[in-house]
Amino acid sequence: MKISRITLTPIQTHRRTGSISSHLILQMHTDEGITGLGEISDLDCYRMYMPDVEAVRTGIEKVVLGRDPFAVQAMHDEMAKYLHNYFVSAPSYPPFTPASQIAAGIDMACYDIVGKALDTPVHSLIGGKVRESLEICYPLFQVKAEADYERNLGYIEELLAQGLTRFRYYVGVDFEKDEKFLAAVRDRFSDRVTLKALDFQARHYWKDVLRAYDRLKQFGFSLIESPSWREDFEGMAEIRRRVEADVCEHCSSAAQAMQMIRAGAVDVFNITVNSGGIHQVRKLAALAELSGIRVLIGTTQELSIGTAAHAHLGASLPELHVASDTVGPTLYAEDVVKERIRFDGTKLILPEGPGLGMELDEDAMEALRAPLVEWDRAAHGAGYVSD
């Protein structure tokens, strides 16, 4: 079997919050009539240097055409010649680069082809499943203006009605507003809401985070994420020694993993398929397991194709004790598959069809086709300030 051609389609989807996310949908066609699906997800964080679709298409073709999709390691060796440092080194926040996300799209399309060819789910190709579902956690972006209080509280009410009870909250634009909002959540919802984590987004010096932690610890979260400036692993280690909550950081490269392990910086690695694909990210999970560090499956908020890749990864990991963040298909109003990946309350259900278990809806994809960037619309993200 050889890869004969690719199709790369730029699309836009609406988030329930009203913002828009851009994605690339990859179809990897073979000479035996099997097509693998991949996703290069939620690219708006690269607004200042958004990938050029035709350049990405040409680059992917240079890497994959004529190659055997079963030879996943050889494919990654070839990608490493062109996508420099996509796994060897990478930033921790955001925990991926355009190169690592392109590699992830290629990787998941290869696994999808192999699973379809063998009529077996992807999880059976990477060790087999040890769980049928993943516990998940829903994101709440921080309040930045007075109007955000009631809007966010109403949003939580809607999610609770759907059985979504576990949340992580982005903090740090204004800690006073954060405290006021979390108090309102506690007063209105009491034990109906579980607060998994506060995400500091790597925006603050670690001593400032300690002061904020003392102010906010009354709200009963179990995890603090990205609690110091990028790659300040010594600062994270200081925080870890001084707080009761577990410390979590995005881990997107082998170099980062080793630095965090040596520094004693974290209790939990946040790992995501976007950091180079299933094949590479399993190495980070193995380092964590051998070092006594727990993992959660992170996200940039994928559609169902990318979420399925995360579900298969999570289903195969021997240790996965922290609720993961892969809830994109519940966040978006649209998708590109005939049947979205399923959620049941706080659980992401593992798809069981061959490959990733997702079937592309060509009409839906064409309806969503759009340029990757439009400068006159607001970008999503916790770091953007409200008008």
Image (cartoon, rainbow, N blue to C red):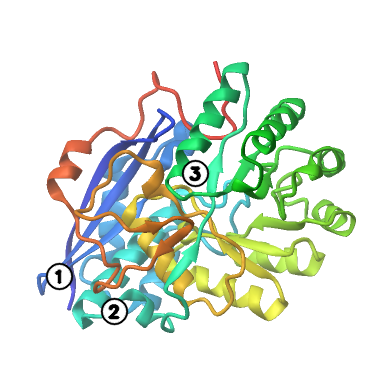
- Tell us which disc is closer to us: 2 or 3: 3
Image position, residue 145 (x, y; %): 62, 19
N-term mark: 2 or 3: 2
Give the residue type at disc 1.
Answer: Ile
Give SS at disc 1.
Answer: loop
> Disc 2 marks which residue?
70
Q: CA distance from mark 2 to mark 1?
A: 12 Å
Can I make out residue 316 in this image? yes
Residue 293, relative to residue 47: is it above or below? below
> Disc 1 marks which residue?
34
Residue 25, relative to residue 82: is it above or below? above
The answer to whether 172 appears left or right of 284 in the picture is: right
> Disc 3 marks which residue?
160
Give the position of the C terminus as an image quadrant: top right
Image position, residue 207 (x, y; %): 87, 42
Q: Quadrant of residue 246?
A: bottom right
